[in-house]
């Protein structure tokens, strides 16, 4: 019969490990859940008495308030949590490799390997080890080899793949009501039994028919495939937005019309200044690398184009700003509203705003940024990383961070909406218009504001996917 899980350890207290295992703790009061990380500052923040958690996610604080100290614990004592648990999630980061073989494409599996070796070294009893991180196909096999080569007598390791499909900004909602939970295992009696043990955990709140069980490699590949297909929809709609701008069609109307086809569906068809986030680009590049490793260059080129279209969309947007402002933005003031890669998150990884600001700086414009959630330090770090050869002092002469949207827009020549924060929709646009240089330009990179209303106020509005 399957192992009865009473204690869970999660290695990695980031955007995935934190919310995922906090929800497991909330929904399974009979299971002790310990989330561990090497990063002490991060663990301290998860433990902070006034719930100043390390990540911003609607509804997360409430979950942590209910479970922390009851059956949910955050700790830097990785070894102890591994020893206690029957089931261990590996939820560490898997960024794109920056150097060496596969640089720029392949996933850096160093963190996964270190976590796996840590488990092998300290475990004194059998464990179910669950890949939660997004990894290339067949990573579970490497994990198994490492675990088996280092295990003590009487320690068995069963490896499962259980990729996470939550989106930032809606993580808690997604975890409460997942479209599906995917579990991959070896199709051996032991593999199937481990799979049942994990399925039991989810059965505490996820309807049985939503828990899909498949082979290990299918599970690993399904995660890359899902992200690639989602990103492909955005690149497709963004490619169409360029045609709309050139022809007079309106991308909102086109997306609405095609989305009515039940085979296409209405979701994820919003044209934008380009997708961001820590995963889409990374996972597609990972798939490109996998295709190349399998000697499938046509398949690799097909997926690579999704990322290239996204880069093109960002470049195209910056160029439209320059073109519209009479072909020069040197010395002009640009207010950038939003810095996060999407609304309802403080995460800035691969945010389109970073590329836009970099472009504006290379034209020697002055930029004022406002984002309701992103930490100021993070903005400086991202801008520095985007322009490593420019000293930060110099960047700071051209960029400042504002405390409100109103302040950012004061005396500006142009406003650029880079993130679809709802509050930007409800700004006092009449007031903002009064404080701006004229003509007052507004570039909506998110199809967020009512262009007709703003035009009536006096703004010169440029919207993605609509002719100028
Ligand atoms: P993250 O960087 O926020 O968190 C990873 C954490 O793991 C870090 O805090 C790091 O200190 C810790 N860590 C690394 N090695 C460790 C070790 N050996 N021992 C203990 N702690 C260690 O990353 P994330 O956004 O949570 O992503 C984690 C994985 O989940 C990635 O593979 C990602 O692709 C995948 N994923 C992310 C999302 C998302 O929305 N962010 C969604 C689905 C899947
Ligand atoms: C995405 C997937 O949606 C999750 O299912 C997956 O688990 C996750 O990646 C992951 O593996 O990390 P996330 O990146 O958090 O989630 O956010 P999304 O809502 O997918 O948005 C990604 C980017 O696409 C954002 O910049 C967003 O603004 C943009 N986007 C999204 C569009 O431009 N148009 C759309 O119609 C939808």
Image: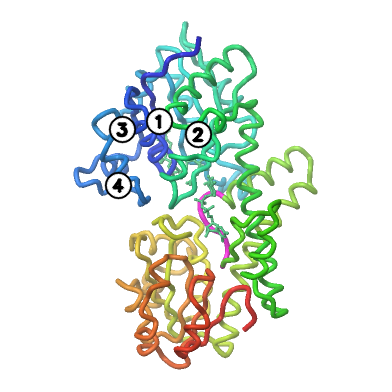
Q: How crowded is mark 3: few (under 14 residues within 10 Å), some or many (20 or more)?
A: many
In the drawing, what numbered circle is on residue 10?
Answer: 1
Q: Would residue 307 be counted in the magenta stretch?
A: no
Asked if residue 298 lies left or right of residue 397, the reply is: right
Mark in the foreground, 3 or 1: 1
Question: Is residue 406 positioned above or below 73 on the image?
Answer: below
In the drawing, what numbered circle is on residue 257?
Answer: none
Q: Answer with mark 3 or mark 2, whichever residue precedes in sequence.
A: 3
Q: Answer with mark 4 or mark 1, whichever residue precedes in sequence.
A: 1
- CB atoms at circles 2 and 4 under 8 Å apart? no
Q: How far apart are marks 3 and 2 (CA)?
A: 19 Å
- Mark 2 Cβ and ligand 1 under 8 Å apart: yes
Q: Answer with mark 4 or mark 3, whichever residue precedes in sequence.
A: 4
Q: How far apart are marks 4 and 3 (CA)?
A: 16 Å
Badge 4 is on which residue? 53
- Out of 238 and 100, give the one closest to the viewer: 238
Q: Answer with mark 2 or mark 1, whichever residue precedes in sequence.
A: 1
Q: Position of residue 11 (x, y in %)?
A: 41, 32
Badge 3 is on which residue? 76
- CB atoms at circles 2 and 1 under 8 Å apart? yes
Q: Residues within 10 Å of mark 4 (few under 14, many from 20)?
A: some
Q: Where is residue 121 in the image (x, y as percent from the top left)?
A: 43, 19
Q: Answer with mark 3 or mark 1, whichever residue precedes in sequence.
A: 1
Q: Which residue is drawn at 54% across and 71% down?
A: 447
Q: Which of the image's four quarters has the C terminus?
A: bottom right
Q: Which residue is drawn at 48% across and 83% down?
A: 453
Q: Where is residue 59 in the image (x, y as percent from the top left)?
A: 35, 47
Question: Is residue 424 positioned above or below 62 on the image?
Answer: below
Element under label 4? loop
Q: Position of residue 380 (x, y in %)?
A: 38, 64
Q: Which segment is the magenta one? A: 273-279
């Amino acid at each position: 019969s399957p192992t009865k899980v009473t204690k869970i350890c999660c290695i990695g207290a980031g955007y995935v490990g934190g919310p995922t295992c906090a929800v497991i703790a909330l929904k399974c009061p009979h299971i002790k859940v310990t989330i561990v990380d090497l990063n002490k500052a991060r663990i301290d923040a998860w433990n902070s008495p006034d719930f100043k958690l390390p990540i911003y996610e609607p509804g997360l604080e409430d979950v942590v308030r209910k479970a922390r100290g009851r059956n949910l614990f955050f700790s830097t004592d990785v070894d102890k949590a591994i020893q206690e648990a029957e089931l261990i999630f590996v939820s560490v980061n898997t960024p794109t490799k920056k150097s060496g073989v596969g640089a720029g494409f392949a996933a850096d599996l160093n963190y996964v390997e270190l976590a796996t070796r840590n488990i092998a070294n300290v475990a004194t009893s059998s464990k179910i080890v669950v890949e939660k991180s997004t990894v290339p196909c067949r990573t579970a096999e490497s994990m198994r080899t490492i675990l088996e080569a280092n295990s003590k007598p009487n320690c068995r390791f069963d490896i499962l793949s259980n990729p996470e499909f939550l989106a930032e900004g809606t993580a808690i909602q997604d975890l409460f009501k997942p479209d599906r939970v995917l579990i991959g295992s070896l199709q051996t009696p032991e593999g199937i039994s481990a799979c049942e043990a994990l399925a039991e955990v989810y059965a505490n709140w996820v309807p049985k028919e939503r828990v899909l069980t498949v082979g290990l490699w299918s599970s690993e590949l399904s995660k890359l495939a899902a992200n690639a297909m989602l990103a492909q929809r955005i690149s497709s709609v963004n490619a169409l937005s360029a045609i709309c701008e050139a022809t007079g069609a309106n991308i909102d109307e086109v997306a609405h019309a095609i989305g009515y086809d039940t085979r296409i569906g209405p979701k994820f068809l919003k044209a934008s200044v380009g997708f961001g986030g820590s995963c889409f680009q990374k996972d597609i590049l990972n798939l490109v690398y996998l295709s190349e490793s399998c000697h499938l260059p046509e398949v690799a080129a097909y997926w690579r184009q999704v990322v290239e279209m996204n880069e093109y969309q960002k470049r195209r947007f910056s160029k439209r700003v320059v073109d519209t402002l009479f072909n020069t933005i040197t010395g002009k003031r640009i207010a950038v509203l939003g810095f996060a890669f999407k609304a309802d998150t403080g995460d800035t990884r691969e945010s389109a705003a970073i590329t836009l600001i970099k472009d504006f700086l290379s034209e020697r414009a002055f930029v004022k940024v406002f984002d309701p959630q992103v930490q100021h330090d993070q903005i400086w770090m991202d801008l520095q990383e985007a322009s490593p050869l420019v000293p930060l002092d110099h960047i700071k002469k051209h960029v400042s961070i504002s405390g409100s949207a109103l302040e950012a827009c004061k005396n500006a020549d142009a406003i650029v909406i880079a993130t679809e924060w709802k509050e930007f929709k409800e700004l006092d646009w009449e007031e903002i218009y009064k404080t701006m240089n004229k003509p007052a330009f507004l570039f909506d990179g998110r199809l967020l504001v009512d262009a007709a209303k703003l035009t009536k106020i006096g703004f010169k509005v440029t919207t993605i996917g609509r002719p100028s």
